[in-house]
């Protein structure tokens, strides 16, 4: 993992992980990671590769999944790969049929595949498809998968871990309408169904992340100089959430942002247009 600078060390406290607890918890379990070909999903696959669980790695890019699978196996792990585009019904149906063919199904679903778009609404007037494709991957795909998975997870007393963004808990920033609306939609869905799932023995976790240094943030030049978590650090947070069954992860400082979003909403709504006008 690349080292953090001073500010990043202050913002992103280390995560202490017990490999023993993780391994004991995961023994004999099957973990499905969506979006496992790059970034956070790849780092998580590597983090879990030394545990005695079976991984199912899902994404579109088969060659990259094969690379990750090879690295997992070289580390002593066990991984199947499944290449599918989760924005199309046929891809989701194929994945559902594949999971149905596994006698015990899966125990843990890591909803990590995600699509981010940063674009002004004035550059989006002829781009309805931006809103469709973010909703397709960030909202409809996990909803459809979970409608199928819930009975299996109930039988296995399983877990759902949603890789979300801290922004969904705060005042929305301009140019992020497509991404933020779709991530918020699934966050709300999960928060609404969680109590019912908990009663049936399925635990849920929401991981609210700040910026993470993956290819997702590469197109935004300004982010190259901003503090960002390393994907390997996020993988530790998710791994710990698995055996601790913690309900949420939020960076310590985000609480101030969430509170500020409520208290200073009017101030934000006054200041942001002035800032945009002066650019
Ligand atoms: N990076 C950040 O700053 C940040 C911050 C907050 C939250 N998050 C969340 O973290 C999660 C992981 O993002 P990341 O930063 O690791 O991004 P990433 O490096 O771009 O990885 C995204 C993953 O999703 C897969 N994916 C994309 N479209 C897909 C599709 N149509 N069907 C199936 N798989 C698809 C990608 O694989 P293929 O291209 O091979 O399909 C890739 O494995 C996302 O849910 C994101 O919203 C990221």
Image: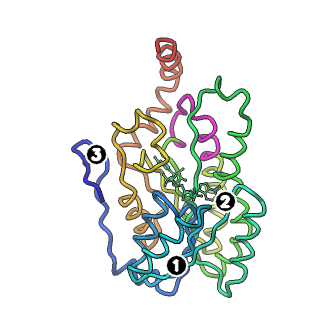
Badges 2 and 3: C-beta atoms under 8 Å apart? Answer: no
In this picture, which residue range is highlighted in magenta?
168-184
**What kind of element bears circle 3?**
helix
For marks 1 and 2, give the CA distance: 21 Å
> What residue do we see at 68% from left, 39% from top?
130
Question: At 71% from the left edge and 54% from the top edge, which residue is drawn?
Answer: 140
Question: Would you say the residues marked 1 and 2 are in contact, meaning their CB atoms lie under 8 Å apart?
Answer: no
**SS for callout 2:** helix
Q: Is residue 50 above or below residue 246?
A: below
- Horizontal relation, residue 202 to residue 231: left or right: right
Whether residue 178 appears in magenta in the rendering, the answer is yes
**Mark 2, residue position:** 142
The residue indicated by pointer 1 is 79
Q: Residue at x 64, y 26 (%)?
A: 123
Residue placed under numbered mark 3 in the picture: 8
SS class, disc 1: strand
Answer few, some or many: residues within 10 Å of disc 1's Cα (few below 14, many 20 plus, some between 14 and 19).
many
Q: Earlier in the sequence, mark 1 or mark 3?
A: 3
Q: Is residue 40 above or below residue 135?
A: below
Are circles 1 and 3 on residues that touch, CB within 8 Å? no
Q: Nearer the viewer, mark 1 or mark 2?
A: 1
CA distance for labels 2 and 3: 31 Å
Q: Is residue 8 above or below residue 29?
A: above
């Amino acid at each position: 993992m690349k080292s953090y600078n001073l500010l990043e060390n202050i913002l992103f406290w280390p995560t202490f992980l017990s490999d023993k607890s993780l391994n004991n918890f995961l023994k004999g379990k099957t973990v499905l990671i969506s979006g496992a070909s790059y970034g956070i999903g790849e780092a998580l696959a590597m983090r879990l590769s030394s545990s005695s669980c079976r991984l199912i790695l899902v994404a579109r890019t088969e060659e990259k999944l094969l690379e990750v699978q090879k690295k997992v196996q070289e580390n002593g792990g066990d991984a199947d790969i499944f290449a599918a585009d989760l924005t199309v019904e046929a891809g989701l149906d194929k994945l559902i049929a594949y999971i149905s063919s596994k006698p015990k199904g899966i125990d843990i679903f890591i909803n990590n595949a995600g699509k981010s778009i940063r674009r002004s609404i004035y550059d989006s007037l002829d781009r309805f498809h931006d809103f469709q494709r973010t909703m397709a991957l960030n909202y409809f795909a996990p909803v459809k998968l979970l409608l199928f998975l819930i009975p299996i997870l109930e039988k296995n007393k399983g877990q759902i871990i949603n890789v979300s963004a801290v922004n969904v808990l705060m005042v929305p920033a301009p140019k992020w309408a497509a991404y933020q609306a779709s991530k918020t939609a699934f966050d709300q869905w999960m928060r609404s169904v969680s109590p019912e799932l908990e009663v049936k023995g399925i635990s849920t976790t929401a991981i609210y992340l700040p910026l993470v240094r993956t290819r997702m943030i590469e197109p935004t030049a300004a982010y190259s100089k901003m503090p960002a978590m390393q994907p390997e650090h996020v993988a530790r947070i998710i791994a710990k959430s698995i055996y601790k069954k913690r309900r949420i992860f939020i960076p310590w400082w985000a609480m101030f942002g969430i509170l500020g979003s409520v208290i200073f909403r009017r101030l934000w709504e006054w200041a942001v247009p002035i800032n945009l006008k002066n650019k």
